[in-house]
Image (cartoon, helix red, strand yellow):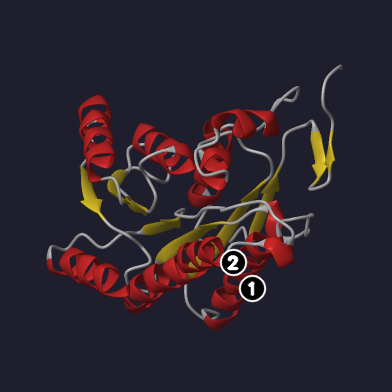
Amino acid sequence: MNRLIGKRVLITGASAGIGESCARAFASHGAHLLLSARRKDRVAELAGELAAAHGVQASAHALDVTDREAVAAYVAELQADDLLPDILVNNAGKARGLDKFHEGALDDWEDMIDTNVKGLLYMSRAILPYMVGRNAGHVINIGSIAGRWVYPKGAVYNATKFAVWALNEGMNIDLAGTKVRVSSVDPGLTETEFSEVRFHGDTERARSVYADTTPLTGEDVADAVVYVANTPPHVDVINLVLMPTDQRHAMILHRGGS
């Protein structure tokens, strides 16, 4: 059963990767879209394409989720226009660098903490009061297996995703007694722009992350997000973990062969 027709979905970081794939998947199910990202031109193009292809409403907004005032202004604008979302997908996130802790770049750390933790906090805090007020809504946080298992040279990125895990659980506890649901979808190795961002544009190093293996795609993760969003209102998928078949743990990845 498709329960998403006519629902309004706000997706952060929708200009590429998992966010773009989620936008495409929700539009194919008849959901209306509120797409945001720092790159307005890319989300505007995507919104136009999906509106034409699927007959849904789709709007684009330039938004940096690390900017608390900009997030508040955007949500206030949505409220004034009666466009508040039924579903919020907190997708905006990034990794920066892959270094031993004592060699890490502080600017990379700030970037990850601001986006992965503070950005999720700002968006959720702005949207959730409206969901609580109407006693309906669903927040879906894009986590990571990095929020379950620490791996070498990933301490700060791991910490931000452990924070997402904790916030996902904490939101659920605080929303007990309401019909507002909170879920996380936690993917393993996924081939998007993620590694290129992590390695500051070093495409060759980024490609090596996925060499001789079959990673997840943005579409695979979007399938899981749509599944979680489409469950009946009395069902809350608290956490959903998915990995490529070649991966069975953060540190166990089969490369090459069958």
Residue pictured at 19% horizontal, 68% vertical: 79
- Residue 185 visible from this viewpoint: yes
Q: Is residue 25 above or below residue 167?
A: above
Q: Is residue 68 above or below residue 242?
A: below
Q: Would you name the residue on which mark 1 appears?
A: 166
Residue pictured at 46% horizontal, 63% vertical: 115
Give the amino acid at mark 2: Val
Q: Position of residue 243 (x, y in %)?
A: 72, 40
Do the residues bearing badges 2 and 1 touch, measured as CB atoms within 8 Å? yes
Helix, strand or loop at disc 2? helix
Q: Position of residue 117 (x, y in %)?
A: 51, 69
For label 2, the crowd category at 10 Å Cα-Cα, with few meaning under 14, some 14 to 19 and many 20 or more, is many
Give the amino acid at mark 1: Ala
Q: Is residue 140 above or below residue 207?
A: below
Residue pictured at 39% horizontal, 40% vertical: 26
- Residue 235 visible from this viewpoint: no
**Disc ID at residue 224:** none
The quarter of the image holding the C terminus is top right
Q: Position of residue 64 (x, y in %)?
A: 32, 60
Q: Would you name the residue on which mark 2 appears?
A: 164
> Front-most of 149 and 104?
104
Q: Position of residue 78 (x, y in %)?
A: 20, 63
Q: Is residue 48 left or right of residue 64?
A: left
Helix, strand or loop at disc 1? helix
Residue pictured at 55% horizontal, 80% vertical: 176
- Residue, far front: 103
> Front-most of 15 and 185?
15
> Front-most of 251 and 188?
251
Q: Is residue 113 left or right of residue 131?
A: right
